[in-house]
Structure formats: structure tokens, C-alpha cells
Amino acid sequence: MGKVFVFDHPLIQHKLSYIRDKKTGTKEFRELVDEIATLMAFEITRDLPLEEVEVETPVGVAKTKILSGKKLGVIPILRAGLGMVDGILKLIPAAKVGHIGLYRDPKTLKPVEYYVKLPSDVEERDFIVVDPMLATGGSAVEAIECLKKRGAKNIRFMCLVAAPEGVKAMEEAHPDVDIYIAALDEKLNDHGYIVPGLGDAGDRLFGTK
Ligand code: PRP
Ligand code: URA
């Protein structure tokens, strides 16, 4: 079974409180999502493999470590996942970025796929799929299915706010995928929105309705 990690770092929790606030406007919302994504990327990369190197300092030789050059890919689920990409790339700038376009049909709440563009070497990369919201879980489950069908083997999922229903759906569909969350909320409402959540992440990021 995949593990579920809830990041309770004070800075993440502080910034999350502001994006939950309905009075927070688009500009600030976007900046905060970017900052939270960076902080989460710091936590999620804790286990990146290192290799030993020797570096000549002005005083001697240091036996030290650098990243071993693991190939990483970041996959935002469009649209709202886009808001997290730059924040992650600040820490792992060499990662390739693929895109999976899904929207949730408002009546059925099922995801509808409209765009897929991935790095050519999918089979060799480790992926972080990102989306601010994990509600019913339909979109994340579908996006990860799409990646696996094309050969991806090592996938993590990172989101800001999750509902228990979405976590359960992910655990059932993709037990091999670890889930990284900033907050695990109470439930979904009748329209499939996370309660208390933060509303429609895509609309709040891009100023649409
Ligand atoms: C939102 C959100 C997730 C999805 C979560 O996207 O960004 O992708 O809903 O819901 P689920 O877990 O029930 O599938 P939306 O479909 O509103 O599209 P958008 O990002 O283009 O606004
Ligand atoms: N998508 C969102 O953007 N917000 C929710 O609460 C649920 C799905």
C-alpha cells in the first residue's frame, strides 16, 4: 500500500490558511500556491539518491556528496496543477515537465481527458504528479493511469488539499503511489467540492469563474 504523508511544516500550514480564505485574491493566491509547492518539493525530495565526490576547497579536499542525477519529471494535471510547477522547478530545475489535461465533468464528476504531452523517456524517469486538489480522486487516478499506460513505473502524487474519499480512491487504484498532502480535510459536499477546502483551485488561480 502507498504511504500518505501530511506535511505539517509551520510555513506550509500558515500559507495554506491564507489560500483557504475566500477574501484572498488571485495574485496572492497564485503566489502562495507557488511558495507552498516549493516547500513541499523540499520535503518530497528528501530521499533523492546522492553519490560521493571529492571537491578541492581552497584549504583541502572534501569528500562530499552531490545528487546522483536521477531523472525526474513533473506532471501537472491541467489546469490547476500548473500553479505548482514553477515552485517545484525552483528546487529541481532540470526536471522535465509533461502535461495531462483533464477536466471534471460537473454533472458526473468524472474526469474527461483532453491533452497529454509527456517527456519522450517516460520509462526512465521518476514522476511527481501535481494538482492542488484531490477530491473524488477521479482526476488523479486517471492521470496516473495515463502515465502508467505509457510506461512510467515510479510515481508520486502531490496535492495541497485532499478529501478522505480521494485518498481512498487513490489507495485502491494505485497502491504503489505515495501521496503527499498539505492538509487532509473533512469530506466532500454534494457537488464534489472539498469541505472546508479552498473552493475551485483552477478558478482561484486564474481568475475565472
Ligand atoms: C479540479 C482539480 C482537480 C480535480 C479534482 O480540476 O484541479 O484536477 O478538480 O477533483 P477530483 O478529485 O474529483 O477529480 P477541474 O476539473 O476543476 O479543472 P481545472 O483544473 O481546469 O479547473
Ligand atoms: N476541484 C476543486 O478545484 N476544488 C474542489 O474542492 C474539488 C475539486
Image (cartoon, helix red, strand yellow):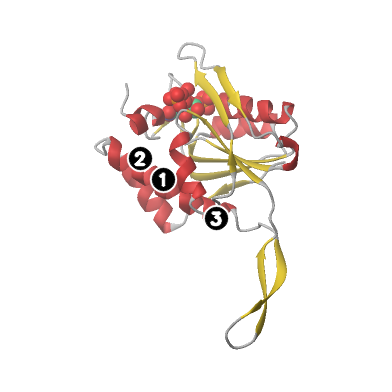
**Whole-percent x, y for residue 4 in the image:** 61, 45
Would you say the residues marked 1 and 2 are in contact, meaning their CB atoms lie under 8 Å apart? yes
Tag 1 and tag 3, C-beta contact below 8 Å: no
The quadrant where residue 180 appears: top right
Name the residue at 57% across, 85% down.
58
Give the distance between the C-alpha atoms of the residues marked 1 and 2, in whole angstroms.
6 Å
Q: Is residue 83 left or right of residue 143?
A: left
**Is residue 42 found left or right of 145 in the rendered image?**
left
* Residue 30, disc: 2
For label 3, the SS is helix
Instruction: For marks 1 and 3, give the one nearer the viewer.
Output: 1
At 40% from the left edge and 35% from the top edge, which residue is drawn?
Answer: 197
Per the image, the residue denoted by label 1 is 34
- Along the polypeptide, which appears first: circle 3 or circle 2? 2
The amino acid type found where label 3 is placed reads Glu
Is 66 in front, or is 81? 66
The three-letter code of the residue at mark 1 reads Asp
Name the quadrant containing residue 120. top right
Measure the alpha-carbon separation of dots 1 and 3.
15 Å
Q: Is residue 42 above or below residue 196?
A: below
Name the kind of residue labelled 2 in the image.
Answer: Arg
- Residue 43 has which mark? 3
